[in-house]
Image (cartoon, rainbow, N blue to C red):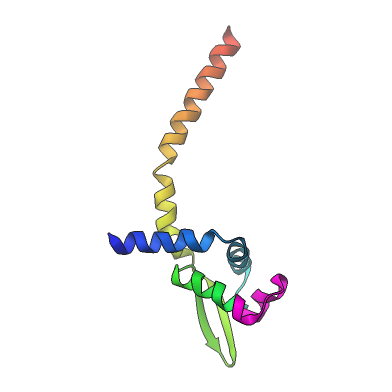
Amino acid sequence: MVEYKSRQEDVFRALADPTRRAMLERLTAADLTVSDLAEPFDMSLAAASKHLSVLEEAGLVVRRKRGRQRICSFAPAGLIEVRDWVERYVGYWNARLDALEVAIRESENE
């Protein structure tokens, strides 16, 4: 159970930063080099690599070497544990929304 929490915490920590979220979003469209990922953020390759390390530790990105380049890919399986955690609250929100719907209908009938 400790490993589960640790991975989940790593994912939440990785997603907490807007730059890392933007990088991840870009990787959902295509595999990119570290240089490609760093460019729109006007950051050094070292800074981009640090962000990518956090995403990699969380299991959200995979890096592989192609010649002298590092190619980064989105790893969607890294989000499964977080999705499962969030889904536990779907029933709660559905019940709240159902109660709201009933209250609205009742007020419309009055």
Quarter of the rendering containing residue 5: bottom left
Quarter of the rendering containing residue 73: bottom right
Identify the residue shown where x is 51% and y is 83%.
64
Identify the residue shown where x is 66% and y is 79%.
44
The N terminus, quarter of image: bottom left
Rendering coords of residue 63 (x, y %) = 51, 79
Residue 61 in view in this figure: no
Asked if residue 87 is positioned above or below residue 100 in the image, the reply reads: below
Seen as rendered, the residue at the extreme left is 1
Rendering coords of residue 41 (x, y %) = 70, 70
Q: Nearer the viewer, residue 44 or 11?
A: 44
Q: Nearer the viewer, residue 59 or 49?
A: 49
Identify the residue shown where x is 65% and y is 74%.
37
Asked if residue 6 is positioned above or below residue 107 in the image, the reply reads: below
Seen as rendered, the residue at the extreme top is 110
Identify the residue shown where x is 49% and y is 75%.
62
Q: Which residues are magenta?
A: 34-47
Magenta stretch: residue 36 in it?
yes
Asked if residue 75 is positioned above or below residue 8 in the image, the reply reads: below
* Relative side of 108 to 41, left or right: left
Rendering coords of residue 42 (x, y %) = 72, 74
The C terminus, quarter of image: top right
Residue 82 in view in this figure: yes
Q: Main secondary structure of the magenta part?
A: helix
